[in-house]
Amino acid sequence: MPSRVISADEDMLSRRVRLMYEKGDENVTDSEVARALAVENGVLWEEAGQTSEATSRFSGASVSGTETKSIVSSVGPEPAPSIKKEPNELAGGIEYWHNIKAGDVDRYGFIRSPTSNSNDAARRAARKREWRREDKWTKMARPTKSSRAGGGMTFEFDTKSSKLIERTWKGIPDRWRSTAWYAFLEASAKKRSDSPTVEELIDAYNEYQFISSPDDVQIDIDVPRTITSHIMFRRRYRGGQRLLFRVLHAMSLYFPDTGYVQGMAALAATLLAYYDEEHAFIMLVRLWQLRGLEQLYRSGFEGLMEALADFERGWLEGGEVSMKLNELGIPPTAYGTRWYLTLFNYSIPFPAQLRVWDVFMLLGDAEDPAGPGVKTEGPGASAFGKGLDVLHATSAALIDGMREIILESDFENAMKVLTSWVPIKDVELFMRVAKAEWKVHRRKKALV
């Protein structure tokens, strides 16, 4: 199992932070940290007044007259402190509904602003369209045997089917989304003999919860700043925040060369909206190993720089917008870093982000027989193969939508529009543009 070097101070800080999330409370005393450490090492600290005659012989006399601690053998590890669920903590304690009504939350769990417009007719039409799509996806799904990991029935899809690809571009019905994403990544994992099994990943995840990480303090700082408007992530040290910390903690240990990087939090939070903590971890590991994120997040971000260079060279170069950006001195690294590291999480509305993820989960496999990270022969060949084409197409679609503004902007205004959140009004149109960019580029590659 991968491991990381950690100092004694980092170890104690990690233990304190992890105990906060176990308790669901930031008030953790030094005594509680010491007790947790003692239990982990096979001994138990007890207050002298609570020890029995049989164990009192192990405790020394108190010179100062104050209470002393006694050390006794521990029969086994104590259970983690249980978090008492409060009345406003619903869905098993994951969601926090204090001062929130059902109508205040959208279908994805985000709290609506009081001024948000509600078009009931459009919503009903969209729902009917999604019902029809649900029936089609039900017919495409094939049940598979479940593993010991549980999680209910699993399904698989023919990931080479042109019908599946076409329907994925149109959007996976939300009822099928988690199942389809999981199946797409599992299909890629089965093609690689070195991919860890689901059971191995779940075992690793649970073991990592008892191992200190030098990144835990930074993770703790970032957790409350991640998707704060979602019903799962409102309560400090509890609910979704607790799950988010645990997943990021495990990721920081599973990939020791990278550790924790800030963009990971947005990815993990999105996955936790669809999966339990163990399967959210599995999905993140699969994204890292099978969809190129390990290269994008690699220390020094060399992979990210290469991906953005691929985008500039293969998708922007030669056009009016490209010439304007070059004239202004704005490279893709100035605006594309957040797009690629968060898979557009902080840049476009959540429904649009999910649509991009639908296609990336299916088509983001490099499909390179030489393996991920290995360059194919020929000038301009990318280490990512075809794996990032969906992200490149999405970036091209975003810039296409900003085209007129960029061409008329100075440096400051161009940077503002490129780095701001993009309020996509018509998600269907946006995805059609991204799909057109993807198809045109694929045809160009086929001719080379």
Image: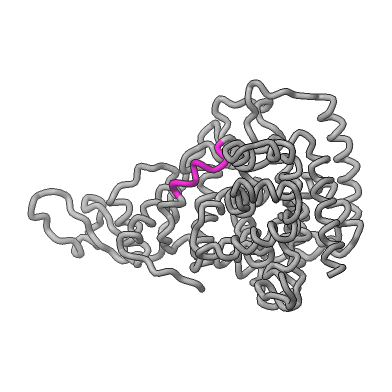
Q: From the viewer's perspective, is 291 left or right of 143?
A: left
**Residue 168 in view of the camera:** yes
The image's colouring method is one colour
Q: In the rendering, at what x and y percent does residue 49 appear? A: 22, 50
Q: From the viewer's perspective, is 157 left or right of 395?
A: right
Q: From the viewer's perspective, is 250 left or right of 153?
A: left
Which residue is painted at 31% across and 66% down in the image? 73
Comparing 309 with 387, the one in front is 309
Which residue is painted at 73% across and 78% down in the image? 377
**Residue 276 in view of the camera:** no
Q: How many marks?
A: 0
Comparing 106 with 242, the one in front is 106
Comparing 46 with 333, the one in front is 333
Q: Identify whether 312 is placed above or below 203.
A: above
The image quadrant of residue 164 is bottom right
The image quadrant of residue 57 is bottom left
Which residue is at the far top?
Answer: 115
Q: In the rendering, at what x and y percent does residue 397 appear? A: 76, 46
Which residue is at the far left?
Answer: 63
Which residue is painted at 28% across and 63% down in the image? 72
Which residue is painted at 74% across and 72% down in the image? 190
Q: Identify whether 109 is placed above or below 39.
A: above
Q: In the rendering, at what x and y percent does residue 179 appear? A: 76, 54
Membership of 353 in magenta stretch:
no
Q: Which of the image's four quarters has the C terminus?
A: bottom right
Stretch of the chain drawn in magenta: 220-228
The image quadrant of residue 114 is top right
Q: In the rendering, at what x and y percent does residue 440 appear? A: 85, 56
Comparing 155 with 80, the one in front is 155
Secondary structure mostly seen in magenta is helix
